[in-house]
Image (spheres, rainbow, N blue to C red):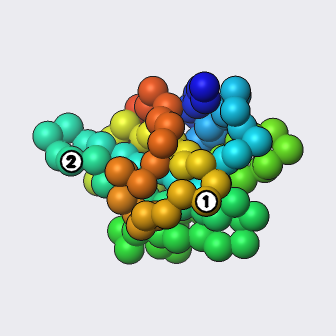
Amino acid sequence: QVQLVESGGGLVQAGGSLRLSCSGSGRTFNFGHMAWFRQAPGKEREFVAAISRSGGSTYYADSVKGRFTISRDNAKNTVYLQMSSLKAEDTAVYYCAVREYGQGGLYDVSGSYDYWGQGTQVTVSS
């Protein structure tokens, strides 16, 4: 069993920054890719960023490229999302996701992930 807990969300003005964290517990030894998705009201969940097991490869949605940075600390079983130059359109509930090592599937598809956190709200005021 795996549990993921996000933190770091909140209210920020446009142009500001936030850092999200997601810590895992349980069967963390088999963590593969870790990712962030988000869901705005009335919209479908969308991919934000992903990082490989080693941290050597990172992937970003075009809408956040150059503004967001994903990283991970395997010793702490934690993935981070540093968000800068925030815009009103970044307002959403942000979810972290993990897939088990060796699992295939596209990194930007929610169905490729095995475990999900409960989400943390990010609100950007314009």
Tell me the quarter of the picture where residue 5 sits.
top right
Which residue occupies 76% across, 42% down? 29
Residue pointed to by mark 2: 44
| SS under mark 1 | loop
Q: Earlier in the sequence, mark 1 or mark 2?
A: 2
Q: Separation of disc 1 and disc 2 at Cα?
A: 27 Å
Q: How far across and down, in percent of the image, does residue 11 sit?
A: 44, 34
Marks 1 and 2 in Cβ contact (< 8 Å): no
Q: Nearer the viewer, mark 1 or mark 2?
A: 1
Q: Residue at x 37, y 37 (%)?
A: 93
At mark 2, the secondary structure is loop
Q: Position of residue 116 (x, y in %)?
A: 47, 36
Crowd band around label 1 with a 10 angstrom C-alpha radius: few (<14), some (14–19), many (20+): few
Quarter containing the N terminus: top right
As drawn, is 12 to the left or to the right of 31? left
The outermost residue toward the left is 42
Q: Residues within 10 Å of mark 2 (few under 14, many from 20)?
A: few
Observer-nearest residue: 103 or 48? 103
Q: Amino acid at mark 1?
A: Gly
Does residue 7 appear in the picture of this structure?
no
Q: Is residue 102 above or below residue 10?
A: below
Residue type at mark 2? Glu
Tell me residue 86's x, y (percent). 44, 55
Q: Which mark is residue 116?
A: none
Residue at x 46% of width, y 48% of height: 113
Q: Position of residue 54 (x, y in %)?
A: 75, 64
Depth check: 79 or 8 in front? 79
The residue identified by callout 1 is: 102
Q: At 41% across and 49% down in the image, what residue appears? A: 37
